[in-house]
Image: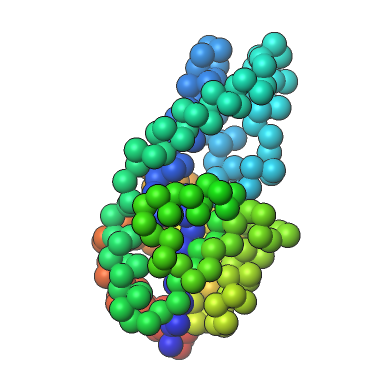
Amino acid sequence: MIKALIFDFDGIIIDSESPELKVWQEVFAEQGRELGFDLWADLVGRPRTHFDLYSYFHQHINPAVDIDALRKERRARVIALTEAQPVLPGVHEYLRGASGMGLKVGLASSSSGGHVRGHLARLDLLGYFHTTKCFEDTQTHKPEPGPYQAVLDDLGVAPNEAVAFEDSPNGVASAQAAGIFCVAVPNPVTCHLPLDHADHRIESLAEEALEHILARANGAKQK
């Protein structure tokens, strides 16, 4: 039987993907240039160390830019937009449902612990999670299985006893590489990305009851 749920953060708990993309698009547009979606698509779900977009901007868009000033200004704009984002539909219901069923709840993210745990605490959601693994907590990152394996270890459950919820191709690949049944829940950014490799897809956590997801995962194990 399924004993644990493991959530991604960005794009699953709140739509923090859209503010990130919006602000970078604005930064490029201010220079009369366009940020290609193909470039952005490869970054979604990965840690920021995978590709330095600031260096790219400096080398290819505006060699005269003050990187430190740009970083400070851009982050302030992103934070303001992100803090205005509501908890995504169905999240509260899934977390309360998991608690009521006695399921363990974990989180696996490529973002920093300060970002993830800070927002979870601000939204009064941190108490639902038995463990959170963020960028600095693992040696490898999505799409590698390391983050999910670390959560499984902390929760004391086997891969076939968990269900993961991801919004990006890299996240789905990470969960599946760890052997976990993965549900894709795209957001306005990742809905344009290929998610067919997920075990199941819903457009929102509000679309399908948690009990149905658990039944799907348990059924998949028996095939």
| Depth check, front residue: 212 or 68 | 68
Rendering coords of residue 3 (x, y %): 45, 82
State how many labels appear. Answer: 0
**Residue 101 x %, y %:** 33, 81
Residue situated in front as seen by the camera: 71 or 160: 71
Query: Would you identify the image quadrant in which residue 179 lies?
Result: bottom right
Instruction: Please give left or right for residue 4 compared with residue 71 in the image.
Output: left
Residue pictured at 48% horizontal, 50% vertical? 118
Quadrant of residue 51 within the rendered picture: top right
- Can the viewer see residue 59? yes
Residue 184 visible within the image: no
At a point 59% along the width and 75% down the height, the residue shown is: 154
Percent from the top left, x then y, of residue 183?
43, 65
Instruction: Name the spot of residue 133 as percent of width and height, x first.
Output: 58, 62
Q: Residue at x 53, y 31 (%)?
A: 75
Q: In the rendered view of the protein, which quadrant contains the N terminus?
A: bottom left
Colour approach in the figure:
rainbow
Residue 73, quarter of the rendered image: top right
Q: Is residue 57 above or below residue 155?
A: above
Q: Tell me which residue sits at (33%, 51%) in the image.
A: 87
